[in-house]
Image (spheres, helix red, strand yellow):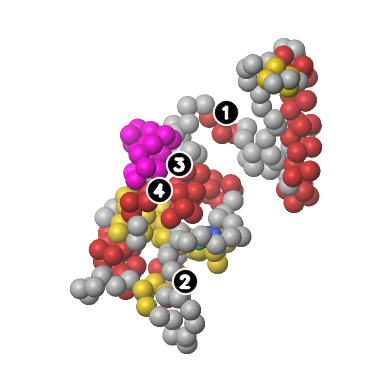
């Protein structure tokens, strides 16, 4: 997969791309990630990328010209044309189901906004979907783009050494994870549940399914009500 990221602040991504899972996936050739500085695609000497909103109001709006120029340059750099996503609190809410859908694409383009938002002709003209990572407002789309990249890259074949671990995780079956424990068996007076030390695999499976269901009901009744929680 190839992912092009358009941003006014490419340096924000450096540590993220050069560490851990994303770094490994890049080194293994599973994903190629290219950063584009939108400011490099301005055509005035002040490298202006934003302006005041027509009709008045606070803040600045990202102008269409530089974003279009950057998107066209990125699209022309490889084939096929990318599926385009604009990170914005106005977007459709991002979910694990959408991460799975995006992981099946050959190419993605993530466009990060700053300021009060985008000129509306940007999503319209680029044919880009707007995507929000949740009901809160960030200073820009960069952190949201990292969320999308990490959640997609870890689904790519070969990115995680134990594919079973991806399949067993929260949301993949519509419920939260069961509680996990490791050594020591007693930590500051709190013991690991006996069943996990019993060696009885069927009892462990049952205990985990019950805890996952309990947790999902208590913490995410919306998920539980959607009827997706795994059967016991
Ligand atoms: N930009 C600002 N807030 C955002 C959010 N919640 N999701 C995606 N992009 C954003």
Distance from disc 1 to disc 3, alpha carbons, whole Å, reads 16 Å
- Tell me which label, 2 or 4, sits earlier in the chain: 4
**Residue indicated by mark 2:** 116
Which quarter of the image is occupied by the N terminus?
A: top left
Q: Residues within 10 Å of mark 1 (few under 14, many from 20)?
A: few
Q: Who's the residue at 74% across and 35% down the image?
A: 212
Q: Are marks 2 and 4 in contact (CB under 8 Å)?
A: no
- Tell me which label, 2 or 3, sits earlier in the chain: 2
- Tell me which label, 1 or 2, sits earlier in the chain: 2
Q: Which mark is residue 164?
A: 1
Q: Where does the magenta region start and end?
A: 14-32
Distance from disc 2 to disc 4, alpha carbons, whole Å, reads 31 Å
Q: Which mark is residue 106?
A: 4
Which is in the foreground here, disc 2 or disc 3? 2
Residue 211, above or below 228: above
Distance from disc 3 to disc 4, alpha carbons, whole Å, reads 12 Å
């Amino acid at each position: 997969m190839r992912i092009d990221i358009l941003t006014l602040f490419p340096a924000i991504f450096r540590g993220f791309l050069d560490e851990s899972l994303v770094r490994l996936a890049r080194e293994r050739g599973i994903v190629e990630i290219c950063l584009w500085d939108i400011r490099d695609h301005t055509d005035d000497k002040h490298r202006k990328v934003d302006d005041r909103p027509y009709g008045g109001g606070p803040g600045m709006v990202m102008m269409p010209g530089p974003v279009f120029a950057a998107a066209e340059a990125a699209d022309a750099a490889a084939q096929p044309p990318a599926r385009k996503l604009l990170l914005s609190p106005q977007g459709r809410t991002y979910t694990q189901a959408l991460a799975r859908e995006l992981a099946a694409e050959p190419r993605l383009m993530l466009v990060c906004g700053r300021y009060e938002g985008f000129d509306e002709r940007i999503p319209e003209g680029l044919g880009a979907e707007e995507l929000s990572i949740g009901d809160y407002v960030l200073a820009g789309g960069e952190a949201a783009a990292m969320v999308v990249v990490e959640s997609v890259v870890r689904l790519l074949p070969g990115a995680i050494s134990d594919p079973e671990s991806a399949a067993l995780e929260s949301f993949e079956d519509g419920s939260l994870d069961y509680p996990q424990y490791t050594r020591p068996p007693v930590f500051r007076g709190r013991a690991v549940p006996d069943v996990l030390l019993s060696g009885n695999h069927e009892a462990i499976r049952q205990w985990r399914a019950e805890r996952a269901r309990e947790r999902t009901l208590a913490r995410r009744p919306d998920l539980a009500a959607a009827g997706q929680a795994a059967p016991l």
